[in-house]
Image (spheres, rainbow, N blue to C red):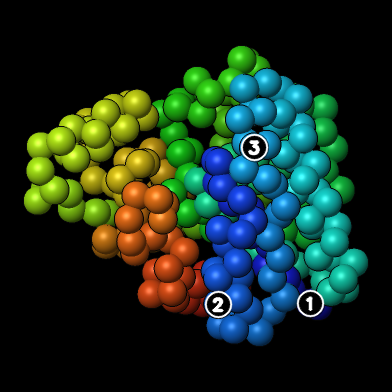
Amino acid sequence: MQRAIVIIGGFTTSPGHYSKMAAQLHELSGLPVSIVPIAMGEWPSVVRRSGWQRLLQRLEDALAAAVAQNNCDRIVIVAHSLGGIVTRLYLSPHSTLEFKPKFANHIENVITLGTPHRRGVVRRLTVWKGLGQCLAEDCMPVPILSVIGAVDYSSRGRVANRAIALRYRFHGADAGESGDGIIPMNSAIYDAQRVLTIPNARHDFRIGHPWYGDPEIVEVWWERIRSEIDD
C-alpha cells in the first residue's frame, strides 16, 4: 500500500503559502505531498452553500490527482484552519450538501491546525443553514488530531491583548483563554482524546512567527502524526 499527503489551506490563503511546509513534509516523510489548489479569492464564497460545494470539489480533484499520480490508497490530510471544516464536510456521512465524495475511503488520518471545530463561529460565516447540522454530527469515519497553539500574549500590551480578546470572544471564548492568537484552544479541539498543544505556535504567518507552517513547528506535529500512522 502506498501513502500520500494532501495539504488544504485556510481562509484567505493560497497554495503558495504552504509550499515550504509541503517541501519539509516531503523531506521528513519521503512521501509525495500536494496542496489543494484553492485561490485566496475563493474562500469568501463559503457565505453560500454553492461556495462550500466548490471547495469540496477542489479537495476532490486534489485527492483524485494524488491517487492517480502516486498510485496510492492511503492519504493523510493536513488541514489548516477552515480547511479542516472543508475536510470534515467531505468526510461527513450525513452531509446535506448533495456532494458524493469519491475518495473518502482513501483518507486514513486528518491533522487539523487551528481549525475552529467548536463554538459556532463557522456557522456565522454562511447563510447556508445546513452547515451547523453537518458539524454537529460528531461521527467522523477517520481519526482527527487537533493541533492548537498556546501563545502567551500577556506582555504584548493593552491594545494587542484587546484585539486578541475580541477574536476569542467571536468564537464564544473568554478573553483569558489560551489559544493561537486567532482560535481559542477549546474551539480548536475536535476529539478531546487526540489533541496536541504546541507552546508559542501562532495561527497564521500574518500575525507572527512561529506559526503552524514554520519548520520547528512542523517537526513537532508531524512527529506526532508519524508515530500514529506508523503503528
Tags 1 and 2 in contact by the CB under 8 Å rule? no
Instruction: Using the numbered discs, state the Cα–Cα distance from disc 2 to disc 3 in whole angstroms.
Output: 26 Å
**Label 2, residues with CA under 10 Å away: few <14, some 14-19, many ≥20:** some
**Label 3, residues with CA under 10 Å away: few <14, some 14-19, many ≥20:** few
Position in image of residue 63 (x %, y %): 79, 57
Position in image of residue 46 (x %, y %): 64, 28
Q: Which residue is mark 3?
A: 41
Q: In the rendered image, is residue 108 in sight?
A: no
Instruction: Using the numbered discs, state the Cα–Cα distance from disc 1 to disc 2 in whole angstroms.
Output: 19 Å
What amino acid is labelled 1 in the image?
Gln
Q: In the rendered image, is residue 122 in sight?
A: yes
Q: Is residue 227 above or below residue 167?
A: below
What amino acid is labelled 2 in the image?
Gln
Q: Which residue is mark 2?
A: 24
Q: Which residue is mark 1?
A: 2
Position in image of residue 31 (x %, y %): 69, 79
Position in image of residue 6 (x %, y %): 68, 62
144 relative position to 214: left or right = right
